[in-house]
Amino acid sequence: MTRSFSGARLRQARLAAGLSPEQLAVRIDRGVFSINGYERGTRNPSASVLGKLAVALACPIDALYDEAARMPPSASAQRTQLAARLTRGAAVA
């Protein structure tokens, strides 16, 4: 099964977190142009950016994919935890 990033799900998660595109962009060290592109579906985030988005939005990476392509909850939680550890490690380095 091919997984597909969902800009609509990113927007839902951002709004649920109470963040503007500008605030999210600052949290993940990207430009607002990128955030808008991800949400509109004209840009796809890299794996590292997906991890940063999940951490910034306090959601599993899996929540940013189309419903049909979602992983089982345990795998999703493990990936989110790994992304958080990698993001913290990058901030320390």
Image (cartoon, rainbow, N blue to C red):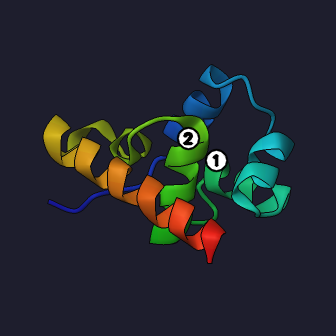
Left or right of residue 71, residue 27 in this image? right
Farthest bottom residue in view: 93
Mark before the other along the chain sequence, 2 or 1:
2
| Residue type at tag 1 | Glu
Q: What quarter of the picture does the N terminus occupy?
A: bottom left
Quadrant of residue 12 within the rendered picture = top right
Which quarter of the picture shows residue 38?
bottom right
Residue behind mark 2: 10
Residue at 65 percent across and 50 percent down: it is 40
The percent coordinates of residue 50 (x first, y second) are 50, 59
The residue that appears at 15% across and 40% down in the rendered structure is 74
Camera-side residue: 61 or 36?
A: 61
Q: Residue furthest front?
A: 92
Please give left or right for residue 59 compared with residue 32 in the image: left
- Front residue (pair 81, 41): 81
Residue 20 visible at all: yes
The residue that appears at 55% across and 60% down in the rendered structure is 88
Single out the mark in the foreground, 2 or 1: 2
Q: Secondary structure at mark 2?
A: helix
